[in-house]
Image (tube, grey):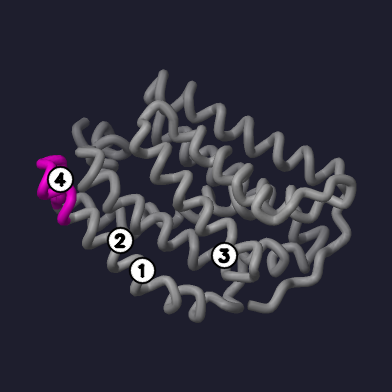
Amino acid sequence: MEQKSIPTISNTRRILEVVAVVLTGAGKFLFMDYLEWRLPYIATACLGWAGYIYLRQRHLPEILAYWGLHKDGFRSTFLQLLPWAIGMALLFILYGHYQGSSQLNWGILPIMLLYPLWGTVQQFLIVGLVGRNLHDLSSINIPFWGVVLLTATVFALVHFPSLLLVGATFGLAIIYTALYLRGHNLLALGVYHGWLGGFFFYTLLNRDPWQEVFGALFSQ
């Protein structure tokens, strides 16, 4: 994959972006886990970071290509990962059926449409900002695999206290961060994040994300 040129971004901005991502992740424990404001939190995070992306590209148009938020490389990345994604989804379904944790229902259909949007936001925050900024910091030379492991650790910790989810997201983040830093398209990674995440919740975690996020709206 072709590496994109690095725009001029100060180390201060890079560090502040990483801190903002960490604070966004910390907000998950308060708003999603404790207060159970899942939909407001997700909507606010998506809108807030979408606004930041808009403002940054107005000031620095090449930033979208730098972040991987464009169509270049989408098809190749999508097709390269498709066999792996199908295999993982089948594995989730079979293992979930075996251990009796699967609760696949019609709710997975809208989740497969909506979750890639949230998955793309998460990929942008974790690998696009944390991983990319740590990798391209001019003041600190962190080895490639050091960046990958640090990024994966941040992503895994956000999914505490579910140890199964922590382990799964750590492994996923290692794969995605390595692919992304080698030039793969971020949007394609976000799509697979959403799809595989949906299957993982419905089959291995015995959870229904549709009901958790939107159930209250439709029960009124």
Q: Residue at x 23, y 58 (%)?
A: 91
Q: How many numbered circles are shown?
A: 4
For the magenta stretch, what is the residue range? 94-105
Q: Residue at x 86, y 41 (%)?
A: 12
Q: Residue at x 57, y 65 (%)?
A: 179
Side (left or right) of 92 relative to 64: left
Contact flag, marks 1 and 2 (Cβ < 8 Å): yes
Q: Which quarter of the rendering shows the C terminus?
A: top left
Give residue 132's position: percent from left, percent from top: 70, 54
Amino acid type, residue under disc 3 in the picture: Leu
Q: CA distance from mark 1 to mark 2?
A: 6 Å
Q: Secondary structure at mark 1?
A: helix
Which residue does the numbered mark 2 point to in the structure image?
Answer: 88
Side (left or right) of 159 relative to 93: right
Which residue does the numbered mark 4 point to in the structure image?
Answer: 102
Q: Which mark is residue 179?
A: 3
Which residue does the numbered mark 1 point to in the structure image?
Answer: 84
Give residue 44's position: percent from left, percent from top: 53, 38
- Mark closer to the chain start, 3 or 4: 4
Contact flag, marks 3 and 2 (Cβ < 8 Å): no
Q: CA distance from mark 3 to mark 2?
A: 17 Å
Q: CA distance from mark 2 to mark 4?
A: 15 Å
